[in-house]
Each structure stands twice: as C-alpha cells, then as structure tokens.
Amino acid sequence: MYNVSQQYKEQMKQPIRNQSYMRIFLGLINQEAQASASVESQEQYTEYSEFPTIFTKNDVGNIYATYEQDFWKADGSTFFIPRNQENYRKNGITTENLFSGNTLIQFSFGYGKSDIRGLTIQFGHNYPTRFSVVTDDGTEIEFENKSAYFETTTVFENTSAITLRIREMSAPNNRVRLFFVRFGLGVQYDNEWIQTADSTSTLSFINEELPEINFTVNLKNDDQRFNVDNPSSEINFLETGQNVSVQYGYELNDGSIEWMQLHTLYVSEWSADDTQSTIKAVDRLKYMSDSYYKGQYYDNGISLYGLAVDVFEDAGIESSGYYIEPYLKSIIVHNPLPNVTHKEALQIISNAGRCIMHIDRYGKIRLRTAFLPENTIESNGTVYFSDINNIVDKKVKNIVASYEKNFWKADGRMVFPIRTGISDSGYVSEEISGDDCTFSENPLITISLQANYTCYGINIKFSGAIPSEFIIRVYSGETLKNTVAVNEINEYDFQLYHDFIEFDKMEIEFIKTELPNNRIHIDYIELGPDTNYTLEYDDLYSTPLGTQLEKIKNINVSRQIYSPGAEDEELTSDTVIYDGVSHIYYFSDPCYGYAASITEGSGTAKILSSGAYFVEVDFENVVDGTQIKFSVTGRKYNISESIHTIQINNRGTDETWDNPLISDQDHCEDVANWVADYYSSGIEYELDFRGEPAIDCGDTIYQENRYVDNLETIVEEHQMTFNGGIDGA
C-alpha cells in the first residue's frame, strides 16, 4: 500500500468523507523529435558537456566551478574540475567561450519535419533574459525570460530543426549552460477539467497473467479546447507513448490536502466531441512487445537477477526504470529462456523467483518477492545458558536466576542456571549495565531475512528488567531504510506500531536498562503483520460476493533437465543474394554447437552471434550481389522432464505448472509449495466499496468476515472511479 499519514488512514474511515481531488500531468512532448534530436556544432562546447542526456534527463546535476562573474559559489553546490578528463562528470552543455552578445544553440531532428507545441528548457543559474527561437524555414519568435526554467506554449510549425539565438544574459561574463530541453510542453488538468476518471489494475500473484493498468479520463471541452479542428488544440499534439502522471488528493480535517501518486502511464488513445475529450493511458508493458530471443543454456548457471537485468537491457530499459528483488541473486538457473516477448520473459523469471511482477505508481517495473522469507537471528553476545534462536518461538521460556539488581526472586518461577549447556530460555545478553544503566558495549540483536519484507509493527516480550531505551534500524542490502528510537517502554509485552517497509535486515540495539546492573532478557520477538489495512463491512456498498473456485486436487510442477545431443545435424540452410549484411535464423527447439559453411559459391560463412533459439550468420570474402547457398549445423539438446506433485485436496482437477527455467529439484519444490499455497484457498471475493486509492494490486489486506477473524486476502484486481468523489471495487 501507498505510505500515507495516520490522519489520512483515520479520516478515510469517517462516515462522511471530505473532498477528493485529482490532477493529471500530461507531457505533450513530440516523441520523434525528442528521440532523434542532436546538438549541432558540438565543437563550441566544453569537454565536460554531455550531449545525448539533455534530451533524456530532468535534473540539473553536477555543476563545475569556473571563473565567471557571480557564478562560483563556495556553498557546496559546485565542484572543482578534475585535472584528468577521464574523471569528468559530464553534464548538460556548456559553451567553451563566454557569452559575447550572440550565441547560437542548434538542434536538429533526424526524423524530418513536424509541428512542436511548446518548448521547455532548463538553463543554468545565469540564464538568457532575451532570446529567440528560429525554425528551419527562418521563422523567428523572440522571448523575454526571467528564470532559469523556461516554458512556452508557442507552436513551432513544420520544422526539422530549432535554433536558440541568445541575445542577452542575466549576468555578464558568463557561459551559456543548458541542462535539459523538451520539445513540447507539460500541461495539467485538475477537478475543474476532470469530469470522470476510471482506473483498473490487475495482476496475478503467481504470474499466471501479465500485470495490466488501464486509465481513462474524460475532460470538459466546453470552450473547444480539445476540438480536433482547432490547429492549436492540445489534442492535436497528443502522441502514443507520451507520459501521463496521475495524482489523487484527499482533504484532511485541518483543511490541508494529502496527495499521493496514483499512476505513471503512457497515452494510448484519444478522441473528442463538443462536450468532452477522452484520453486513455496504459502501463509501459503494453509497449514491450519485441521478442527476447537471446536465451541460452548456462553451463555454470546464471542468477535470476542477472537474467532479469539482461532482459531489461535488451528491451532498452534503463536501471532507473525497474527494480529487481536482490533475493533473486541467490537463485541460480541453467535453462534458456524461450523465444518470447520481453514482458513474457520477465513473467517467467518472476514466477521462477516466487515474485510478484507489477508496475508501481511511478511507472517502474518491479519484481518483488511474494512469500514469507525465512530469517536468521544473531547477537553480539549472550550468557552461556541463553538460546538466541528461541526468541522466534512464543512458547513460555525458563527464567534463569542470575545476579542482577532486583531480579532474583524466590517465588518459584525462576530456575537455577545449569552448569553447562543451553537452558530452555530466551535471549539473555552477555553485557550487564553499569550503575548508570548504560552498557560498555550495547547488546545488539540482528534479524536477517532471506528477502525483502514489509511488516507493520513489532512485538517484544521482555522477561527481565525492562529496558528504558533502545533503537531499531532496518536495512535493505547495505542501505539504511529507517531508524526508530524507543524510550517509552511501560510493560513487559511491548508493542511498537510503526511501518517497516521493504527491509531484509533489522537491528535492535539496547542503550539503557530501567534499573542499574541488569541484563536484557527477551522471551520472543515477533515481526508485525504484513498488512495494516482492514476492509470493513461499513466500507462496503453490499455484502461480499464470494465464489468457490473449482477445486484443485494436485499441483504438478515440471522441471526440465538438459543434456547434450548425440550428433550434429543440419539445422537450417538458405540461398541468398549477398547484400553485405548478416542473417538471423530462429529455431523452435533449443540448440547449441553451431557451425556455418557455404555449400554453393565462394567465400566463408561464420557464426556472428547465437543463443539456444537463434543463430546469426555473417560472410567474408563474398562479392556483393552474388548468390550463395549455405548451411548451419549444430546439435539439439536432449530434454527430459520430471514432475513434482503436491496434493491440495482429496478431489478436483490437476493443475500442471510448467516453467522452462526450473531444473533443480529444490527449486522445483519451492515453486511447487508456493503455487500450491496460492491454490489451496479456492475462494475468490468481489467487493464494491467506497474506494481506497492507497491500495495497490498485490497488497495483502484484512477483510472483515462473519466466520474468520481478520481474513487475509490478496488484491489481484483494483478498480477506482473518480467524479469529485471516489468509488472502488
């Protein structure tokens, strides 16, 4: 769920809700111009300029201190230029010479001519105050400017190039800097414009289907702002793939509005009549339809993490556009990915790693674990009779009498310490506090999880003197995610209500005891539940519609074991008129050990690149335009199959689960148990309710139920309608 304030959580449960808001940011960027743009006359810029990134990034970045008037600031915002050019942090474009009255910055577009509605430029701290924009037909439009961030709605018609002619700067004796430029404009629509908006998100917890987000908004068109016959109409500058950012806001009781990101999507369709304009947007997976054909068998194995990175890179998605659960680094596979689309390849990887694949609110594709991770517990020292591993068990522990102030009680509940070995006790720190209640070395308990996990709160049962102060730190990998200082501990059964989001290590460090000369005694530590949201009957418009799904008797999960083929065979042959380019051929069966030869004609054939399902053939010493016949030989893998079966019910149908990456028996059993746990429920619920924009698909939520207290359910489809208020399903 989206991380919201406590006020929001409480006030969304009010019988009568406050006002809801929505705002939509639409980037009317000319996608072709943006993608094909280049900077002309690059020799006029410094060597620490970086030309391609000004068309892709959205920040200012590093600024080097140079001798310019009113520019070099000793406030930590600028950097010294390295002596070695190899160490330059290249950023934006900066002119080599100081501004001298007339500077031209020229951009050309490789795709040809088109109309561009608006221009957005991030200049440097010293910015142009008067400049003009010149199109390729000589049309020149002059602008006056008062800030480093410039934006205009002017339409630049039928142009294949744009030139900035800079005439005046805000300060003399300065260079011209430009950090990013967008050929288009960002526009915003809010409650004044939005008539209705509908959002539907779906996913499969075990990746049976690809995740999907569809968003539709209807905007008022009373002033014909979106009329297609209006040449400056915003709808005429819409393009498939333009960014759409959707935010939801709720008015709190104090009058402030709490905003949350709802979606980051891409325009897919649009239309308009005289009363309204309709814009539809989809998630980025809709545009990942190219094939990943580079699957190969890995003799030494590859981690699911490394395989996912390879798929993302092959799809052209930068690391900022995805998140992969680090746990996938520990799962090694050998089998090749089949020739499928990039999104289907990620779907296969997610299932093999027991992950949910989803698109987060900022458009990032996320592969995150969808199981309760195992954990290990360690400490920096315990007394000899203590058992640190016992604190995960809530059973009653022995309280061992030890020499601590006001601790040893002759009431029959304590036991004498045994001479050797571990007693059936919990955690007892080796360190004992001094007269000032502090420790010479703070007792530290570390809980390491197999994978990232989110929990809401933590329960600690103390069995000795209550500590007066301790600190909880959580990490994801080596990154510190959160620190919570606790200094109010009023009872032995201590509960901390705090959201710990996506961590794989928790440290609990004890600072002081309540009484001097005491150890830390803990019976058990329990991480809180993985949800803190309950969908109650008061939230519903009607009672839940429950459907008993068809019972599954057995889950059959297959694993595929590859072995070398027996002999070489001809995999393909072809006759071509050589045109100087290589040729790629695809196979339905996984193969290896390729060799290519020309069977008719002169020259040499060679394998340029290959995978289990493709081979790329190139030629040497072949004259262009001549006909050649060639052959590719290789071996097909022998593939055997083994089935692991788990029984769920005494009757029902069998469900077969086939993931081509699974070959190891332990891996197969882990996935089988995970899938079987999903199918064991067999109940699907549909609920119409007041709506909750903080819910995400893939969330676990409590559902009020007449027969089961705090029934845990997984959200696989979430619908929301906005019309000034919200409804949900």
Image (tube, rainbow, N blue to C red):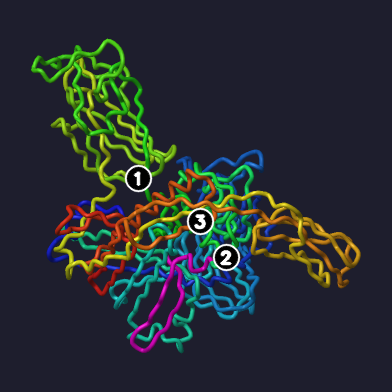
Left/right placement of residue 292 relative to residue 706 reads right
Instruction: Check disc 3: other Cα within 10 Å, few if <14, some if 14-19, many if 20+.
Output: some
Q: Is residue 281 magenta?
A: yes
3D distance between C-alphas at marks 2 and 3: 63 Å
Sequence-wise first label, 2 or 3: 2
Left/right placement of residue 287 relative to residue 14 reads right
Considering only vertical position in the picture, is 103 above or below 518? below
Question: In the depicted view, which residue is nearer to us: 102 or 372?
Answer: 372
Q: Give the mark toward the camera: 1 or 2.
A: 1
Sequence-wise first label, 1 or 2: 2
Q: Residue, x 22% and y 34% (percent of image)?
A: 394
Q: For the image shown, how many numbered marks are present on the structure?
A: 3
Q: Residue, x 34% and y 79% (percent of image)?
A: 219
Instruction: Check disc 1: other Cα within 10 Å, few if <14, some if 14-19, many if 20+.
Output: few
Three-letter amino acid code at the position of disc 2: Arg
Query: Tags 1 and 3 in contact by the CB under 8 Å rule?
Result: no
Q: Secondary structure at mark 1?
A: loop
Question: In the depicted view, which residue is nearer to us: 224 or 400?
Answer: 400
Three-letter amino acid code at the position of disc 3: Asn
Residue holding disc 1: 372
Q: Give the mark toward the camera: 2 or 3.
A: 3
Q: Is residue 144 magenta?
A: no
Which residue lies most toward the left here? 411
Residue holding disc 2: 167
**Magenta stretch: dominant SS?**
strand
Residue holding disc 3: 659
Tell me which segment is drawn in magenta. 265-288
